[in-house]
């Protein structure tokens, strides 16, 4: 008999079925054993009566063991979900040791175990349905974005993680031994996606690993994380990029709503509010929030400006635009009418930066000039600068950090909570 998912049991009332999953809860009431079985789609109560051939097996089960149950689906008003299963047969597929290193089911009271222990036993931590929901939502979101990319003629490319030079901005990169020489792990697919534009692919997207060798111990930084990147050719300016990004994000939210209605996710309104960094600073000042940097937002300022915008517009998202050249890389294009400002933006969501985007400088002589101004080594950049010498459309793009997006969407306070297996300064396992 084919196994069915617990969520589909309602369509099988009165039928005999096979279900499989983990023993979520056991209640032994002497002449009757209740097994709450959990699979990836839900939970169901199974009643094992004394006359069931596997009654003794049911009595000996341990929570979190993996079993198969054959039984009759019955409507039962008293049971959670309105259905239960009258158990006919139980097969023990894998037995769980009676003591779990961390609890799955916290119903017996108490808080969740601390994050370090939970990450050490991530495979047990993730058995909690609310944790699985994060990854279901992430998958649905990517399905939505993929629809957006398909409708809008994007092409997916896969960029390498090994690099010959230490990447764009000279930021901290991991050095690895690469046969007889050294290689570096890409801290951004930035240059490669620009190369895709020079290749004539026009619109590209990437989902892949990004490495940062920064000794950060914050709740928003990891040493390896998934990056979603996009790059678009033939744009007019960074406003085209913001428009694309808000549409792709909205499509992601819509797909979660459609595929996982039980999560009750709110779809954001587009267009997202947009304010310049100058306006943001003015609003913060008016609210009595002082920042250390004239041209950039501190984490506290990011949090406060999101609160202010939320109150003003009701939106959880806000683009902060037109950053000063002093805090932007050499390749960001500058405004014609104010060369001190870049055609760039950061997207903030519920108090945290989730994206940096910008129109890139595609005119080789200006790009080179800006690189010299920023004291970049032109020899190291020579291959990059070449992309623009043989015809390259005006273009721009951005990188989204999905872990920050899902952290905020699910109300967690640490990106590690929404990362399958996080990597940071201290953690290289599991
Ligand atoms: P921050 O200023 O917060 O360190 P960044 O400016 O270095 O971030 P970008 O290089 O613009 O970030 O990367 C694009 C996006 O990737 C960021 O907006 C963020 O969402 C995400 N991101 C950046 N660094 C990390 C990290 N160490 N861990 C997790 N996500 C990150």
Image (cartoon, rainbow, N blue to C red):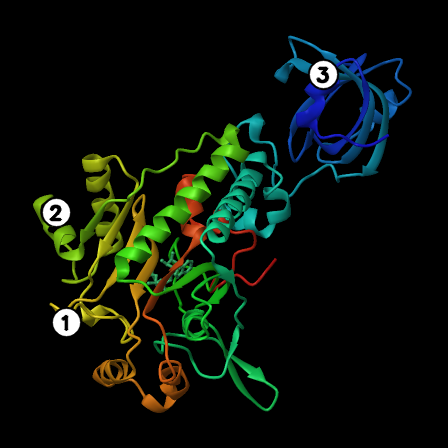
Q: Secondary structure at mark 1?
A: loop
What quarter of the picture does the N terminus occupy?
top right
The answer to whether the residue labelled 1 contacts the one labelled 3, judged by CB atoms less than 8 Å apart, is no
Q: Secondary structure at mark 2?
A: helix
Q: Which mark is residue 339?
A: 1
The first of marks 3 and 2 along the sequence is: 3
The residue indicated by pointer 2 is 283
Q: Which mark is residue 408?
A: none
Image quarter for ligand 1 equals: bottom left
Compared with 359, 418 (above or below) is: above
Q: Position of residue 277 (x, y in %)?
A: 17, 56
What quarter of the picture does the C terminus occupy?
bottom right
Image quarter of residue 88: top right
- Is residue 206 shown to the viewer in this render? no
**Which residue corresponds to the image point at 27% horizontal and 60% vertical from the top-left?**
238
- Please give left or right for residue 332 compared with residue 424 in the image: left
**Which residue corresponds to the image point at 27% horizontal and 82% vertical from the top-left?**
371
Q: Position of residue 186 (x, y in %)?
A: 47, 73
Mark 3 neighbour density, 10 Å: few (under 14) some (14–19) many (20 or more): many
Q: Nearer the viewer, mark 1 or mark 3?
A: 1
Q: Position of residue 103 (x, y in %)?
A: 61, 37
């Amino acid at each position: 008999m084919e196994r069915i998912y617990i969520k589909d049991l309602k369509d099988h009332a009165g039928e005999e079925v096979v279900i499989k999953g983990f023993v979520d809860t056991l209640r032994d009431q002497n002449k009757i054993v209740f097994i709450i079985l959990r699979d990836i789609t839900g939970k169901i109560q199974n009643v094992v009566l004394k006359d069931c051939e596997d009654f003794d097996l049911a009595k000996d089960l341990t929570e979190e063991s993996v079993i198969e149950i054959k039984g009759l689906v019955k409507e039962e008003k008293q049971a959670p979900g309105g259905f239960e299963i009258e158990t006919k047969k139980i097969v023990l597929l894998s037995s769980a040791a009676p003591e779990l290193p961390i609890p799955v089911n916290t119903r017996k009271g108490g808080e969740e175990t601390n994050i370090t222990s939970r990450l050490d036993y991530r495979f047990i931590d993730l058995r909690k349905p609310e944790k699985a929901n994060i990854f279901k939502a992430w998958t649905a979101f990517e399905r939505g974005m993929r629809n957006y990319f398909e409708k809008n003629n994007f092409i997916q490319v896969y960029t390498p993680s090994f690099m010959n030079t230490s990447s764009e901005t000279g930021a901290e990169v991991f050095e690895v031994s690469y046969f007889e020489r050294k290689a570096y792990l890409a801290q951004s697919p930035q240059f490669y996606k620009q190369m895709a534009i020079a290749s004539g692919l026009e619109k590209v997207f990437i989902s892949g690993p990004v490495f940062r060798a920064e000794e950060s111990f914050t709740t928003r930084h990891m040493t390896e994380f998934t990056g979603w990147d996009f790059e678009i050719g033939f744009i007019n300016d960074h406003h085209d990029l913001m428009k694309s990004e808000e549409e792709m994000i909205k499509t992601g939210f819509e797909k979660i709503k459609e595929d996982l209605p039980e999560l009750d996710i709110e779809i954001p309104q587009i267009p997202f509010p947009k304010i310049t960094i100058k306006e943001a600073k003015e609003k913060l000042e008016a609210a009595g929030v002082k920042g250390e940097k004239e041209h950039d937002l501190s984490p506290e300022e990011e949090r406060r400006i999101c609160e202010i915008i939320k109150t003003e517009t009701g939106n959880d998202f806000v683009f902060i635009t037109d950053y000063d050249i002093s805090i932007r890389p050499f390749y960001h294009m500058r405004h014609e009418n104010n060369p001190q400002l870049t055609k760039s933006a950061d997207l903030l969501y519920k108090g945290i930066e989730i994206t940096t985007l910008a129109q890139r400088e595609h005119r080789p002589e200006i790009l080179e000039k800006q690189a010299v101004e920023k004291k970049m080594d032109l020899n190291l950049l020579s291959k990059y600068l070449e992309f623009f010498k043989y015809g390259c459309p005006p273009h721009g793009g951005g990188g989204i950090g999905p872990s920050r997006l899902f952290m905020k969407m699910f109300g967690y306070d640490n990106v590690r909570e929404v990362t399958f297996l996080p990597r940071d300064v201290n953690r290289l396992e599991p």
